[in-house]
Image: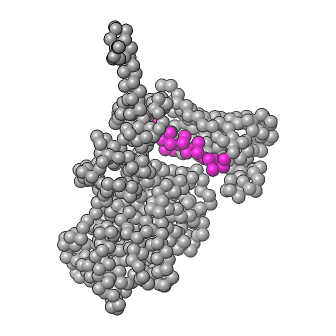
């Protein structure tokens, strides 16, 4: 069977829309009959990535592809990039401003949560060019 | 589809349709929060697995074709002794009363032998919630979500599997009131429990369903439910007669219990945590649940009521919910706070049956089937007009596409596609007539 692809463009302008892509993808995955646990892991990982797109990268793209008992998630942006990727993946590290923290975000658990909830995680970032995250959730 | 379609085994829903009154318009299908209604063959029908009994369709039906199922007062004749279980929201239906005493007396005048306030039981549930939160502090899945509103519990069980473990595993104040009232009446009269009828005065259809098939327990403590708007005129009449007479029924419930009738009453009564949230109105409830699946926001307790304003906003209430809310607040300031609510064994208030996830979103019975249907769904949605006009009987084009891939509708039920197709056929016929020398135009 052919893979199923769901794609969302995430706007970096509007905080009120942050999280919409993950809610939609979560509901689509449920319709596909994917086990609840895998849907949860994928939804949380996408949510964290989506919030990062809004906070740090002025938007980007979220893609989820489902095939052969796995959900492959690809997050891309043309944002500022991450100068020190090793630092960014460590728990509690955050560059979020106070304003963002006041909204309840920026606890430095975004990328660590993505790593925790996915079976495979890969991040590539070039300062000045952008960031690409690839994650896989198996079921 | 009504509860009767389930072979009488499980009482699922308390919302039914009067076929004669239904005109097959699209008001209810458009406003149902779970997209559980379709118009088929000119009449609305409810998809049982999706319906959460919120009563929204009853509210929006202009032809009064959607009804709630409940008992009428003649149900009292089925028992030797009857106890009315009034919810705190009932008191707010009346004007110019300082406390609930006169309402309790009026209930007896209407024909009940005794009254047991649900608000009194609610105070015990508040105390039990407090105990649950403090004894298990740090070990719970936060935020703990209230289970007092059966619409919310049902919604979570069909759509939010990740939040099932967040539910507060305590029986509802209505069930506890029934349990306590039955015990008290049995001791008082010497009658066996089956001869005693505990009858709830319900603000909504969801609570009717919940008393017939309780959530989290096999025990049924409440025997019947009568709609508040049915009993309201009778109560009003009796209250006028009672007038300034000194009421003899002593209320049990204090300000905390009364507060349960409005949104925020349950959460603000908790002393052990101030990290709580209260949301009302089904659309707002859904919005909060979507967010809670991803993020806890540091919350410890969440109170959600499907109706605007809380139970005072129930579809079977009489008073405007916002005015009712103001009345509850006024009454709360008049009566005392019970320091030590009636005690009951905490463990016995806990659920004794697990609440299962009843997935309702999957397109098929197996993952393979769902996957295959999803593939067809994606391309079908592309080909639909996207107008969400509702003429096919489904609330949106996306919902219609799901119906088609599940085999419950035909593509040509879409009036826009049908019209396009008809035009095509017409044009083809026209050109074929032209080519053989016929024409439908009159030649001069």
Residue B71 lies in the magenta stretch: no
| Residue at point 29%, 81% (across, down) | B238
Residue B415 in the image: x percent, y percent? 38, 33
Question: Which residue shows up at 40% across the image and 70% down it?
Answer: B319
- Pick whichever, A83 or B376, lies toward us: B376
Q: Can the viewer see residue B168 in this picture? A: no
A35 drawn magenta: yes
Magenta stretch mostly in which secondary structure?
Answer: helix
Q: Residue B56, position in %: x, y?
A: 40, 56
Residue range (magenta): A14-37
Eyeballing the image, is A33 above or below B104?
A: above
Q: Nearer the viewer, residue B254 or B356?
A: B254
Q: Position of residue B441 (x, y in %)?
A: 35, 17
Taking B321 as reference, is B97 above or below it?
below
Quarter occupied by residue A65: top right
A77 with respect to A72 (left or right): right
Give the residue at x 40% y 64%.
B314
The colour scheme used to paint the residues is one colour
Residue A96 image offset from top left, x and y in percent: 75, 51
Q: Is residue A21 left or right of residue B332?
A: right
Residue at the farthest top position:
B436
Question: How many labels sit on residues?
Answer: 0
- The answer to whether residue A137 shows anywhere in this view is yes
Say if A111 sits above or below B332 in the image.
above
Q: Residue at x 59, y 62 (%)?
A: B299
Side of B91 where A24 appears, left or right:
right
């Amino acid at each position: 069977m052919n893979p199923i692809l769901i794609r969302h463009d995430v706007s970096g302008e509007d905080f009120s829309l942050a999280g919409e892509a993950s809610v939609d993808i979560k509901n689509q995955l449920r319709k596909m009959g994917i086990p609840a646990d895998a849907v949860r892991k994928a939804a949380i990982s996408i949510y964290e990535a989506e919030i990062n797109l809004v906070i740090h990268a002025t938007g980007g793209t979220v893609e989820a592809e489902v095939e052969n008992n796995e959900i492959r998630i690809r997050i891309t942006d043309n944002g500022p990039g991450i100068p020190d990727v090793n630092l960014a993946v460590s728990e509690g590290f955050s560059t979020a401003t106070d304003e963002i923290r006041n909204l309840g975000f920026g606890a430095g658990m975004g990328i660590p949560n993505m790593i925790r909830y996915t079976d495979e995680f890969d991040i590539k970032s070039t300062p000045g060019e952008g960031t690409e995250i690839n994650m896989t959730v198996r079921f | 589809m009504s509860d009767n379609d389930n072979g009488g085994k499980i009482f699922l829903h308390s919302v039914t349709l009067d076929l004669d009154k239904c005109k097959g318009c699209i008001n209810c299908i458009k406003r149902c929060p779970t997209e559980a209604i379709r118009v088929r063959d000119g009449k609305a029908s409810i998809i049982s697995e999706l319906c959460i009994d919120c009563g929204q369709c009853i509210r929006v039906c202009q032809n009064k074709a959607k009804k709630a199922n409940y008992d009428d007062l003649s149900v009292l004749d089925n028992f030797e002794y009857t106890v009315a279980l009034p919810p705190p929201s009932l008191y707010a239906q009346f004007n110019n009363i300082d406390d609930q005493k006169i309402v309790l007396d009026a209930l007896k005048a209407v024909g009940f032998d005794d009254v047991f306030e649900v608000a009194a039981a609610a105070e015990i549930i508040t105390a039990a919630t407090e105990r649950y939160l403090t004894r298990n502090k740090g070990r719970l899945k936060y935020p703990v979500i209230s289970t007092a509103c059966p619409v919310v519990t049902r919604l979570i069980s069909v759509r939010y599997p990740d939040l099932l473990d967040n539910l507060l595993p305590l029986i509802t104040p209505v069930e506890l009131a029934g349990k306590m009232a039955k015990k008290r009446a049995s001791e008082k009269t010497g009658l066996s429990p089956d001869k005693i009828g505990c009858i709830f005065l319900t603000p909504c259809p969801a609570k009717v369903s919940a008393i017939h098939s309780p959530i989290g327990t096999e025990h049924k403590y409440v025997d019947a439910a009568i709609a508040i708007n049915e009993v309201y005129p009778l109560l009003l009449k009796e209250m006028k007669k009672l007038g300034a007479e000194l009421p003899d029924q002593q209320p049990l419930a204090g300000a905390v219990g009364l507060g349960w009738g409005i949104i925020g009453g349950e959460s603000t009564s908790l002393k052990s945590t101030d990290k709580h949230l209260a949301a009302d109105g089904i659309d707002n409830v859904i919005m909060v649940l979507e967010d809670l699946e991803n993020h806890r926001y540091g919350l410890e307790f969440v109170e959600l009521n499907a109706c605007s304003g809380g139970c005072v906003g129930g579809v079977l209430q009489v008073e405007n919910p916002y005015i009712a809310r103001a009345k509850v607040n006024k009454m709360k300031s008049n009566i005392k706070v019970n320091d030590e609510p009636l005690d009951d064994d905490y463990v016995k208030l806990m659920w004794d049956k697990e609440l299962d996830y009843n997935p309702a979103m999957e397109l098929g019975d197996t993952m393979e089937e769902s996957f295959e249907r999803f593939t067809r769904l994606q391309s079908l949605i592309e080909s639909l007009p996207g107008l969400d006009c509702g003429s096919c009987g489904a609330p949106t084009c996306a919902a219609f596409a799901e119906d088609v891939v599940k085999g419950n509708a035909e593509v040509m039920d879409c009036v826009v596609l049908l019209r396009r197709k008809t035009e095509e056929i017409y044009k083809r016929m026209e050109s074929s007539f032209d080519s053989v020398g016929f024409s439908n135009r009159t030649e001069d």
